[in-house]
Image: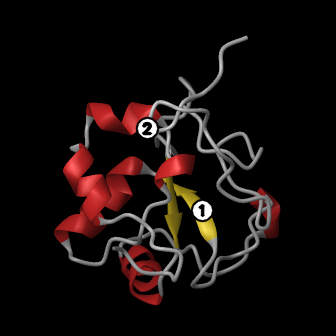
Amino acid sequence: MTTDRNVYGTELEPCSTDPMTGFLRDGCCRRVESDRGRHELCAVMTESFLEFSKANGNDLITPNPEFDFPGLEPGDRWCLCLGRWLDAVEADCAPPVVLEATHEAVLRDVEPDLLRAHEYDGNGDAR
């Protein structure tokens, strides 16, 4: 069995179990071949990002029990689609990233300096 690695090359840490996140709903932002959305990036939700995502067709605020989705609030950690996070970077509202819980596969498409610029500082902000 292989161990998933984070962007530091160490063991991938869980992103969140409350709410339960990840493509596999196991709490981790794993690289899963069948996941076309690439939910590999662990982010801490902000009001501005949640509103941006809703305005762009992905309402992460409203609960959707049919899909076992609780709805998110600022401060919640969630495995985001890599493309949506990159869109938010362009719109200057990208949420901070928990690098220890972000899969190393994102490094194929995102420069390490960009990730570090959005690194979660423990207070809900990027460093």
Q: Residue at position x 76%, y 72% from top? A: 70
Badge 2: few (under 14), some or many (20 or more) residues near its Cα, within 10 Å?
some
Q: For the residue labelled by badge 1, is the local secondary structure a helix, a strand or a loop?
A: strand
Q: Residue furthest bottom?
A: 47
Q: Which residue is drawn at 60% across and 62% down?
A: 78
> Picture quarter containing residue 61?
bottom right
Q: What residue sits 21% from the left and 77% below the top?
A: 92
Q: Residue furthest top?
A: 1
Q: Residues within 10 Å of mark 1 (few under 14, many from 20)?
A: many
What is the three-letter code of the residue carrying label 1?
A: Trp
Exactly how many numbered labels are in the figure?
2
Q: Earlier in the sequence, mark 2 or mark 1?
A: 2
Q: Name the residue under label 2.
A: 8
Secondary structure type for disc 2: loop
Measuring from the top left, give residue 74's x and y in whole percent.
57, 85
In the displayed structure, 111 sits above or below 122; it is above
Task: Specify whether 17 is left or right of 22.
Answer: right
Whole-number angstrom distance, CA of label 2 to CA of label 1: 19 Å
Which quarter shows the C terminus?
Answer: bottom left
**Residue type of the residue flagged with mark 2:** Tyr
Locate residue 21, reporting x and y percent: 69, 55
Number of the label disc, if any, that sits on residue 63: none
On-image quarter of the N terminus: top right
Q: In this view, does 94 lie above or below 23?
A: below
Question: What residue is pinned by disc 1?
Answer: 78
Which numbered mark, 2 or 1, is in the foreground of this view? 2
67 or 35, nearer to the observer: 35
Report the colour scheme. secondary structure
Q: Position of residue 7 (x, y in %)?
A: 42, 39
